[in-house]
Image: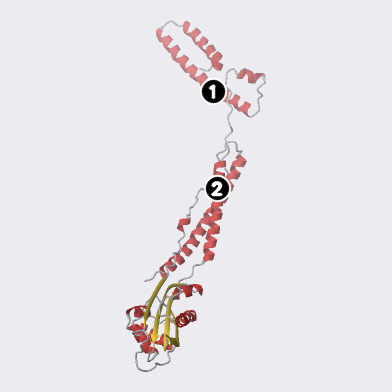
Amino acid sequence: MKRKTFLLYALVVCVVIFASLMFTKADVFSYVKESFNNTVNIVHEKINNGFCNDYNTNINNGIWKTDEFKSKFINLFCERIIETPKKDIATKEIVDEKLSFSTSSIAKINTIQKVITTSATSSPKPLKSISDNEGLKISSNVIIYWTNIQRKENNLPALIENTELSKIAEIRVNDMFTNSYFQHVSPTGDSVSKIADRSGVEYIIIGENIALGNFDSSRSLVDAWMNSEGHRANILNKNYTQIGVSSIDGIYEGRNVTISAQVFDKPVSDCPAINKDIKDQIDSFILIKDNLKADINKIELSLQDQNLSTAEYNSKIQQFNSIIGIYNNLIVKIKELADIYNKSVERFNYCIVIK
């Protein structure tokens, strides 16, 4: 029983005791005792639920002043309870439907593993002509023609002539004459792949066939390459899509000979292009997304502040919902762009694999 309500309880007790002294019978005393308990409960409930609640409401709302006589008097019976007014229900509910997106969802572009295939022949032996004749003029165009005939007979698509590859083949042949060697790598370490790299030729696979000798015709030169396992593999390589040829007459170790070179490749341009603008847009959106996520977290934390007024609370909820809407729309857009980008990367990665 609280100290402040003691006087009221004492008054009730005195009344009950006085009444009980007027009765002497045991059954009457029992009745009085039960009535006492009921009275105490009613008075206690009345004081707390009615009288004191009204007092606290008037004090908290400023209707009554603490220095007024009535406030001081009632304060003897009631303990003042100061409650923080509860905020009204927000004008807009929190829409917490944050979507997620990880940068790991962006497909990675595989690194091109450049492949170089080379073989050499002297048709069939170095510096020895196939026939007793001095040989006929070898034509680059005719070499390409007969090379594609061989591919057609083996159910392979024709190779497309590429002027850049023909220039590389010409550089290779002239270098062999100038430095008197007949190999795929020059004495200075130069090669078809290094020349291609210097020339800015982007390839996935590149290869070279070279021949030295006096051949009856361009067809006989192609036949000689086809009769050599390594050269044949180059001509019939299903990965190649382009060809360049150079065939030049000159003096090699004191003799008039023809040196010919075939250069094959599969350029990077054969593979589906990856739209880097989409990747840049995705990166930009991800940055915005991360900034929005930080703002969302800040607002969520600020909503826990019990000192916010109702207006402030509702304003922050509206701000939260607005940012969540932008955030989720952005995530959906990022996922759509990532799907487009990832499919293009998947096609590119599949294309660059040497089969």
Circle 1 residue: 48
How far from the left and from the top, in percent, is residue 322?
Answer: 57, 50
User: Residue 120, how many percent across, how many down?
Assistant: 37, 79
Q: Out of 348 and 324, give the one closest to the viewer.
A: 348
**What residue is disc 2 on?**
296
Tag 1 or tag 2, which sits nearer the N-term? Answer: 1
Q: Quadrant of residue 109?
A: bottom left
**Looking at the picture, which amino acid does disc 1 mark?**
Asn
Q: Is residue 246 visible?
A: yes
Along the viewing direction, whichever of 289 and 260 lies nearer the viewer = 260
What residue is drawn where x is 50% and y is 57%? 332
Most distant residue in the bottom direction: 133
Q: Colour mode?
A: secondary structure
Left or right, 280 with reference to 205: right
Q: Where does residue 297 sit, x and y in percent of width and height? A: 54, 46
The label on residue 87 is none
